[in-house]
């Protein structure tokens, strides 16, 4: 990852954090456990599927090699 990409990633991550925070009910901000649980739920419902979809479509035609030198096609 280039320094420019890392900077962009950090900027986008900060923006995502602000959006998730603004959409978290105050009752979920009472403990680290509640924050963690709510953040995980938001990640699984909103963020994860978007990233998963990107990887699924972008890696469909890639070739990977295992430790046994077998080729797997995605």
Image (cartoon, grey):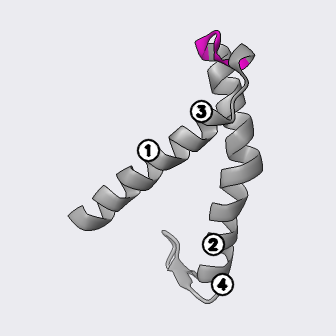
Measured as percent of width and height from the top left, residue 67 is found at 48, 69
Tag in front: 3 or 4:
3
Tag in front: 4 or 2:
2
**8 displayed left or right of 52:** left
> On screen, 17 above or below 2?
above
Judging by the rendered image, the residue that carries numbered circle 3 is: 21
For the residue carrying disc 4, how many other residues have a C-alpha within 10 Å: few (<14), some (14-19), or many (20+)?
Answer: few
Q: Are marks 3 and 4 in contact (CB under 8 Å)?
A: no
- Is residue 18 something one can see in this rendering? yes
Measured as percent of width and height from the top left, residue 46 is found at 72, 51
Distance in Å between CA atoms under marks 3 and 4: 34 Å
For the residue carrying disc 1, how many other residues have a C-alpha within 10 Å: few (<14), some (14-19), or many (20+)?
Answer: few
Judging by the rendered image, the residue that carries numbered circle 4 is: 60
Measured as percent of width and height from the top left, residue 43 is found at 67, 44
Mark linked to residue 14 = 1
The N terminus appears in which quarter of the rendering? bottom left
Please give the name of the residue rendered at 52% of the width and 72% of the height, measured from the top-left corner. 66
Q: Which of 22 and 13 is in front in this view?
A: 22
Q: Give the range drawn in magenta.
A: 28-32
Judging by the rendered image, the residue that carries numbered circle 2 is: 54
Q: Nearer the viewer, residue 35 or 53?
A: 35
- Queried whether the magenta region covers residue 29, the answer comes back as yes
Please give the name of the residue rendered at 65% of the width and 10% of the height, measured from the top-left corner. 30
Q: Do the residues labelled 4 and 2 touch (CB within 8 Å)?
A: no
For the residue carrying disc 2, how many other residues have a C-alpha within 10 Å: few (<14), some (14-19), or many (20+)?
Answer: few
């Amino acid at each position: 990852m280039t320094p420019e990409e890392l900077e962009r990633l950090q900027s986008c991550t900060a923006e995502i954090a602000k959006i998730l925070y603004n959409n978290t009910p105050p009752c979920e901000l009472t403990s680290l456990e509640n924050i963690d649980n709510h953040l995980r739920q938001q990640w699984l419902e909103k963020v994860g599927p978007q990233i998963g979809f990107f990887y699924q479509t972008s890696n469909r035609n890639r070739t990977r090699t295992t430790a046994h030198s077998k080729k797997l096609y995605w």
